[in-house]
Image (tube, rainbow, N blue to C red):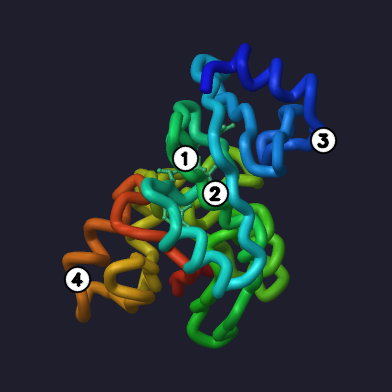
Amino acid sequence: MPIRALARQALHSSITFNRTQTGTVVCMIGHHIVRIPSFDGTEIVLANLRRPDRYSRLFQDISEAPRCIPRGGGLSYCAASTGQGIVSISSQCFNRILAFDKEKGSVTVECGVTVGQLFEWVVKHAWIPPVLPGHPSITVGGSIGFNVHGKSQFHSGNFGDWIEMLWVYHPDHGEQECSKQSNAELFYLTIGGFGLTGFITKVQLRLKK
Ligand SMILES: Cc1cc2nc3c(=O)[nH]c(=O)nc-3n(C[C@H](O)[C@H](O)[C@H](O)COP(=O)(O)OP(=O)(O)OC[C@H]3O[C@@H](n4cnc5c(N)ncnc54)[C@H](O)[C@@H]3O)c2cc1C
């Protein structure tokens, strides 16, 4: 539906105002349709945004959507995690640190954990995430989707170089584990895969001293 028609509909129905993850005020109708600008402001999409808060709902939202795309912090310069007629599935509520091996320097987190959150957690134990992109609200899921780099790229490579294991949900295959050793095709296609292989639920990462 064109923006003007939606705005007209909003005038005559109960609407609420809310904030997207990028902090932009948007008009929400029925709590789903939101106006999402790309970070650089060049693209504005009226998208159907879902924010599931538990795994059963996440899997249901993905399975029911005719076309969908995972969404992290929405901090890509382009409209990478949204699209006209597409259901954006937010990882915002999946933000727990699940396991941490202090001796080995290995951490398992949900995909909605931000790089800022991750840094704050591991640095207390004298470890650091080796690759940190330039905004603390970028999520781990988004860092994998774009295989991001930090200022340390010349010696630490990209985010994907530090992944030990991934868990990816796809409605046709369920939640699958993958690594360099097992299910390697899914593993390599997911790193830098723009969210097209499925929804990354969890990741195990190696850290650095
Ligand atoms: C101020 C600023 C500084 C930046 N600095 C850097 C930098 O130093 N280096 C760099 O490389 N990039 C940098 N970027 C770009 C940013 O790191 C990437 O665009 C990153 O992908 C954004 O992550 P996000 O969490 O916002 O995800 P989104 O923008 O929401 O999504 C990015 C992609 O990841 C996919 N995705 C997100 N979550 C999941 C998931 N759970 N499962 C599967 N796919 C998923 C999406 O579908 C989409 O294709 C910067 C951006 C900004 C705004």
Q: Position of residue 46 (x, y in %)?
A: 55, 28
Q: Which residue is mark 3?
A: 16
Query: Is ligand 1 closer than 8 angstroms to the Cβ of mark 1?
Result: yes
Residue at 45% across / 70% down in the picture? 203
Badge 4 amino acid: Ala
Q: Are marks 1 and 2 in contact (CB under 8 Å)?
A: yes
On screen, residue 5 above or below 121:
above
Distance between the alpha carbons at the discs numbered 1 and 2: 7 Å
On screen, residue 65 above or below 171:
above
Mark closer to the chain start, 3 or 2: 3
Q: Which residue is mark 2?
A: 72
Residue at 70% across / 61% down in the picture? 120
Badge 3 amino acid: Thr
Residue 194 vs residue 57, the one in the foreground: 57
Classed neighbour count for the residue bearing mark 1: other residues with Cα under 10 Å, few (<14), some (14–19), many (≥20): many
Query: Which element type, helix, strand or loop, lies under badge 1?
Result: loop
